[in-house]
Structures are given as C-alpha cells and as structure tokens.
Image (tube, helix red, strand yellow):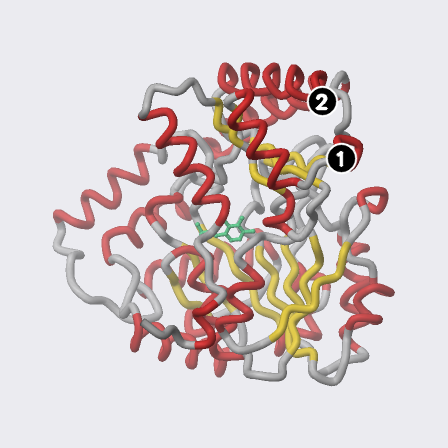
Amino acid sequence: MKFAERAQQLQPSLTLAISAKARDLQKQGKDICSLSTGEPDFKTPSFICRAAAEAMEAGHTRYGPAAGEPALREAIAHKLQTENKLTYGPDEIMVSNGAKQALYTLFQVLLQPGDEVVIPAPYWLSYPPMVHLAGARSVVIPTRQDRNHQLSGAALAAAITPRTRLLVLNSPTNPTGTVYSEQALAELANVLRQHPHVAVVSDEIYEYILYDQSRHVSFGAVAPDLAERVFVVNGFSKNWAMTGWRLGYLAGPQAVLAKATALQSQSTSNVCSFVQYGGLAALRGSREWVHTMVEALAQRRQVLLHTLDSMEHVHGMAPHGAFYAFLNIAAANLRSVVFCERLLAEAGVAIVPGAAFGDDQAIRISFATDMVTLKRGLKRLQGFLAKL
Ligand SMILES: Cc1ncc(COP(=O)(O)O)c(C=O)c1O
C-alpha cells in the first residue's frame, strides 16, 4: 500500500507506546515500575462522573452542536474571564476531543506548505508531527537548563522569518515543568509586536498543576493588544484526571474558530454529548479536589527531588509545574533511547527518552504515579546509574 506523503514519516506517540509496553510487560508477570505515564493516577472526581451519567440518563446521547454544548462554552468563557483574564464569547470557543484535537484542528486551519512554526525545545512530542501533517515546517529552538528551559525574546526574534506563521507556547511545560512568568511572557509579546504575521498558540493544559509559589499566567492576559492572533488551548485531562474522557477546548478569534468548527463538523462532528456535561460540572464545581491532587503530586515531587540529589550521572531543574522531571544524562554517555531501553531491560523501570522531546541527552521521569511505585522506581534507577 502506498501512503500519502504526509503520512509516510508518521509514527505513534512514543509516550503512549512506552506506557503500553510497560503495561504489556506487567501483564506478562514482569515487575515493572512505570514512571513514564503522562496522566494522573487519580480517579476522576465522582461529582464529575455523576454529572455525565445523569446527562446520559437525561437523553444527552445524540448529535450536538459541532462547536460544543452552549452551556459548556459559556462556562469556559466564564472560566477564561475570571481565572485567566481573557475575554472570549461562546462563539470564540470550540470544545474538542482533548487539547490534542484542538491543536491539530488549529494547525490544519492556519498552516500551509511553506509556513514555519516556532517550537521551543524540549517540547511536547506531538507538536512537530501535527505541524508536519498540516504541511508546514517546525523550527525547533533549543532552550537552556540554566535559563529554566524558557524561550527568550532574543531567541524568538532570531528564529522569526517572513515564513513564520505560528509560535507554540506551553506553560506549565511538558516535559521540563518550567512555568513562564508574566515578565518572560511580556518579553515574547514585545518581539511578536514587531512581527504582525506571527500568531501564538498557548497550550495551558497543566495550568493548575503548580508547585511552591509558582503562578500560572496566560499569554493572552499579558498581551491583550495581540488578541487577534492569540489562541488558547486547554482541557480537562490533567487538571481533573480526565484523560480518557477526551475533552478539551480551543479559544481564539471568531473567524478562525468558525473555520475550526467547520473542520470539526466535517471530521468528528461533536465531542461526546454527555461527556461535555462532566466538563461542565468540573468547571462549575469548586477547585478543592484539584488542590488535593496537586498536594499529593507535590509530595511525590519532593521525594523525587530528594532522591535525585544523591544520583550519579543525572541533573536537572526542579519542575515548577506539570508532573515531570526532565533530567540531563550527558554524563552517562548513552543516547537517551539506549538509556531507556537498558533501564527497562536491566532494572524494570519505564521512562521516556528525551529524544522524543527534542533532546537526546535527557530523560523524562513522570511522578504522576503512586508513591510506592515512584520510590521503588527511583531506587532501581539509582542502582542502574551507580553501575554505569
Ligand atoms: C503539553 C500537552 N498538551 C496537550 C496534551 C493533550 O491533552 P489531551 O489529553 O487534552 O488531549 C498533552 C498530553 O500529554 C500535553 O502534555
């Protein structure tokens, strides 16, 4: 079978593949500690599950508006206004099958062959394939650990060409856990003011998962004057442990959102109707459950940071958000894929190679797993490193 050119290089998501491999090995009876997962190990709060079940019983089981249930879009608009200082009407919001589909759809309607998309590295691994599927080219800009893995205004300015169409920002960031401050975002906004042909998408999927005194700031709130070319992507997967529900959203200028909705109506129709009522309950509910989850994650992060202090061959910045540590393994003198393969085979620990995120001298450890598995996994990693 001959594939379309755009599909020829397409590979499955490495993070999903590694988690699946770890699960397979566990099923075969192998003792595997998986520190690879990109999802909280918590159950979706029951008030959200109940709301979706009640919606199903109440008959929300049919096709709905392609852009999403009006009540949910209004609740999202309210949330963006009150929590993020972003003003969007319901017709500037589209509910999607996860944040992933929001990004995919946006890229499909904005990008075309010849366009360039600036992506700071390390990046979330799905951005470049999505850019490629839209016919455009990723321009990857490495960031430095000693600068908290954040894109500077100067680096952005140097990357922009007449072909640049989009900048992808992600804060809190997967995989590094960096959180952009208001000042850091303002610096990027200043550069973008000089380049009116460049739009921005701000992926805020880890917005509530913050540690110490970190504060989440939306790019759009820092630069309201750029609203005509700013898009926000967010969702329910990480903040409410709803990864399997596939519920996210895109907000931005109405004309683009109308096009994105048209694409959705021609491809997936609407997001599962009753799932959207779960999302509505999440937004209308208190954030108490989220705070409890983040506190538990914070304790695991402490354990991780404490153990890392005594590990050989690895170093990295303490994550300020999300639930990953991105560690430099240059001293181990192994390519990241080889490192991870050996760690799995020799020590039974699954983690993700940095190559998947654009840095082959690093590894990503997830601490979104129970404390027992985390401690066992770290102990094994420690033993593995000591033997290298
Ligand atoms: C940075 C980032 N953006 C988007 C997503 C996709 O989230 P969703 O489950 O809502 O599609 C992920 C999931 O891992 C992510 O890490």
Which residue type carries mark 1? Asn
**Residue pictured at 64% horizontal, 69% vertical:** 138
Tell me the number on the disc at residue 333: 1
Of 197 and 311, nearer the camera is 311
Left or right: residue 125 versus residue 333 is left
* Displayed quadrant of residue 388: top right
Residue 74: image x %, image y %?
40, 62
**Residue pictured at 43% horizontal, 40% vertical:** 240
* Displayed quadrant of residue 19: top left
Q: CA distance from mark 2 to mark 1?
A: 9 Å
Under circle 2, the secondary element is: loop
Task: Decide if residue 320 is in sight here.
Answer: no
Q: Does the numbered disc 2 mark a residue whose Cβ is under 8 Å from ligand 1?
A: no
Under circle 1, the secondary element is: loop
Residue 143: image x %, image y %?
78, 53
Tell me the number on the disc at residue 388: 2
**Numbered disc total:** 2
Please tell me which of labels 2 and 1 falls first in the chain: 1
